[in-house]
Image: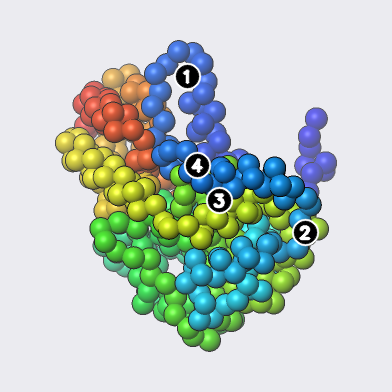
């Protein structure tokens, strides 16, 4: 029934969710009785801590569930400033609480960009940024790293951003993730500050999604931003509870922290759209931010990462990327590009590899072709160790069935 005339032209620029399509593919096979192991998506292990569930129960019992307007609970907004270690630069008035980090980013994009505008996206970052920019009406343009990119984990440098801004002088913002989903790399404080400075010099916002900022390993700490006019006037931080606390993804609480005029405008846009998260989940988020952090979670994820890497190095023709952060690892399978399957199908891309491994090994992985990373697949290690071991064993056996040509 739908035709181009029935829908806004903006809609036709928005692609379906890659993760949703992968999940649907896996569900079809599971319903058919196939023993699929899903390493495409990741959720932190465990349930929402009992203390946080108790806060939710008490909020309902004591009547703290009434309608909540505005940019969020003042106490939560203040706690966010502390959580982000931005007390030197921001106050609660510089924070917008939203129904998830995506909603926070969407509200910011809605008030700083629109039709005809360009928003640059870190070329190694996950594809959700492109779709949120398209929803705002702006045009997402990948900002690719220059020479030596692979040696630095596909991270952008200030020179890369400056060159792209010179090519596109009407750019409104740059969106990047730190740590990066899907490469798992981290921009250090100097790298990030240099990029913010380049953006500020051109009057361009630098939006940093730091959703995985608590999942940083090997004794490293997240590189917090310092106090500079560039950060003060042109940098927006996006964050939330989903990748910081066990079982917190379903709370749908995120936030944006940045220049007050941007935050006030984004709060107005949100008020006329989705509205803020409910009072109950905001109270739970507040309690989470004010509680001692669960170091055991970090240790558990780091151990899972180490276990996965031990398994991966035993696979033929597979090289894992370093994993200083997040819950993902990129596997380099470029040695298998051009190989031929037992039925004569040539493997030309990450997508082909992922399809082959799903069909023959019953292992669901995320191909990175759409993010410009041909021959790489993303694996989530937030799984039980026995699942990781089984998946790597299946992958090894299935790759062994491929025939290399030349």
Is residue 349 positioned above or below 241 on the image? above
Q: Quadrant of residue 101?
A: bottom right
Label 4 with label 2: CB-CB less than 8 Å: no
Closest to the camera, between mark 1 and mark 2, is: 2
Find the distance from the CA under tag 3 to the CA under tag 1: 26 Å
- Which of the pair 158/312 is nearer the observer? 312
Residue annotated with mark 3: 128
Find the distance from the CA under tag 1 to the CA under tag 2: 42 Å
Label 3 with label 1: CB-CB less than 8 Å: no
Q: Which mark is residue 50?
A: 4
Q: Disc 2 on helix, strand or loop?
A: loop
Label 1 with label 4: CB-CB less than 8 Å: no
Q: Earlier in the sequence, mark 1 or mark 2?
A: 1
Q: Disc 4 on helix, strand or loop?
A: helix
Q: Quadrant of residue 160?
A: bottom left
Q: Earlier in the sequence, mark 4 or mark 3?
A: 4
Closest to the camera, between mark 4 and mark 3, is: 4
Q: Which mark is residue 30?
A: 1
Closest to the camera, between mark 4 and mark 2, is: 4
């Amino acid at each position: 029934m739908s035709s181009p005339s029935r829908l806004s032209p903006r809609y036709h620029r928005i692609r379906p969710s890659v993760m949703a399509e992968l999940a649907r593919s896996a569900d079809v096979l599971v319903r058919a009785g196939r023993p699929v192991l899903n390493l495409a998506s990741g959720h932190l292990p465990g349930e929402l801590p009992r203390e946080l569930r108790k806060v939710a129960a008490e909020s309902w019992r004591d009547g703290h569930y009434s309608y909540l307007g505005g940019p969020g609970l003042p106490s939560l907004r203040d706690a966010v400033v502390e959580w982000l270690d931005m007390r030197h630069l921001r106050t609660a008035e510089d924070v917008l609480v939203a129904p998830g980090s995506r909603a926070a980013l969407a509200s910011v994009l809605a008030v700083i960009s629109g039709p005809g505008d360009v928003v640059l996206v870190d070329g190694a970052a996950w594809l959700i940024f492109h779709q949120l920019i398209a929803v705002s009406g702006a045009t997402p343009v990948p900002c690719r790293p220059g020479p030596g990119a692979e040696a630095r984990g596909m991270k952008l440098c200030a020179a890369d951003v400056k060159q792209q801004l010179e090519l596109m002088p009407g750019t409104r913002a740059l969106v990047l993730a730190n740590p990066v989903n899907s490469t798992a790399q981290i921009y250090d404080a100097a790298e990030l500050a240099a990029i913010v400075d380049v953006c500020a010099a051109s009057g361009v916002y630098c939006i940093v999604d730091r959703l995985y900022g608590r999942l940083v390993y090997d004794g490293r700490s997240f590189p917090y931003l310092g106090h500079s006019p560039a950060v003060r006037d042109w940098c927006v931080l996006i964050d939330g509870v989903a990748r910081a606390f066990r079982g917190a993804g379903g709370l749908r609480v995120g936030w944006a922290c940045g220049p007050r005029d941007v935050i006030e405008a984004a709060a107005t846009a949100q008020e006329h759209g989705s509205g803020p998260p409910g009072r109950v989940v905001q109270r739970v988020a507040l309690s989470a931010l004010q509680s001692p952090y669960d170091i055991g979670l970090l240790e558990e994820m780091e151990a899972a990462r180490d276990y996965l890497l031990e398994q991966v190095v035993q696979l033929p023709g597979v090289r894992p990327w370093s994993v200083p952060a997040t819950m993902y690892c990129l596997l380099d399978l470029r040695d298998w590009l051009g190989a031929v399957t037992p039925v004569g199908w040539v493997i030309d891309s990450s997508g082909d590899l992922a399809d082959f491994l799903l069909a023959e090994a019953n292992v669901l992985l995320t191909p990175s072709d759409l993010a410009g990373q041909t021959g790489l697949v993303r694996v989530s290690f937030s799984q039980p160790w026995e699942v990781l071991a089984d998946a790597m064993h299946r992958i090894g056996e299935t790759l062994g069935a491929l025939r290399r040509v030349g």
